[in-house]
Amino acid sequence: MRKIKAIMLACVLVMPLLAKADGISSLKNFYDKTHAMRANFYQLVTDKQGRKIQEVYGQMQLKRPNKFRWDYNKPFEQQIISDGKQVWLYDTELAQVTVRELSKTLGSSPAALLAGDDSLDKNFKLMNASRTDNLDWVIATPKEKDTGFDQISLGFKDNALQEMDLVDSFGHQTKIVFTKLESNPVIDAKTFLFKPPKGVDVVGE
């Protein structure tokens, strides 16, 4: 009988701790403890009516502050790479590279949530959200206007990022699901360097 009571007491003590898990605390824990990340991703873009616009697969890597790389492999190849100062977008099919200063690109963008510095509360309004998928969700609304995104949602499980949902200014929804996630891997610095291939057009700053 005493053993049963002890188990019940332990459950009572643990349950409130479990109940405290939420999206905002998971996001801030991710910010504090995840200095680098590597994962595969699946990205689905739909319009206002829920019709599929785009479906792609690839790999992403990041290293704080402000270094990231997204390699889109299927069904088309594209690279988005930040060396911490500039962001390069390379479209292999168009043989074109677009480059912009990071300060003009990051701000209140989705990349700022993952690879940004400590300006989370400065750039975003955070609010907990609940869904029926057993993830801890947080909604991040950019404080600045004209960022291209009206709302960014992040879903965590055990403080590990599982999914991002983005709603842009056109009402399109982008769902990104992460798999094979590695937290704080050692990433070669060369990963975030980009040199335009010969023969491609370079557009931008």
Image (cartoon, rainbow, N blue to C red):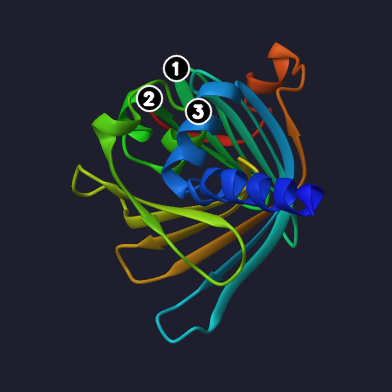
Rendered location of residue 185, percent (x, y): 76, 22
Residue holding disc 3: 31
Q: Mark number for residue 155?
A: none
* Nearer to us in this view, 114 or 148: 114
Earlier in the chain: of badge 2 and badge 1, it is: 1
In what quadrant of the picture does the C terminus appear? top left
**How would you rate the neighbour count of disc 2 (Cα within 10 Å): few for under 14, some for 14-19, many for 20 or more?**
some
Residues at discs 2 and 1 in contact (Cβ within 8 Å): yes
Residues at marks 2 and 1, CA–CA distance in whole angstroms: 6 Å
In what quadrant of the picture does the N terminus appear? bottom right
* Nearer to us in this view, 19 or 171: 19
- Look at label 1 and name its amino acid: Lys
Rendered location of residue 108, percent (x, y): 32, 39
| Rendered view: 35 above or below 138 | above
Residue holding disc 2: 101
Asked whether, in this view, residue 160 is left or right of residue 186, the answer is left
Of all residues, the one furthest to the top in this rendering is 189
Q: Mark number for residue 85?
A: 1
Residues at discs 1 and 3 in contact (Cβ within 8 Å): no
- Look at label 2 and name its amino acid: Glu
Residue at 65% across / 24% down in the picture? Answer: 36
Residues at marks 1 and 3, CA–CA distance in whole angstroms: 20 Å
Label 2 residue SS: strand
Would residue 74 be visible to someone looking at this image?
Answer: yes
Residues at marks 2 and 3, CA–CA distance in whole angstroms: 23 Å
Label 3 residue SS: helix
**How would you rate the neighbour count of disc 3 (Cα within 10 Å): few for under 14, some for 14-19, many for 20 or more?**
some
- Look at label 3 and name its amino acid: Tyr
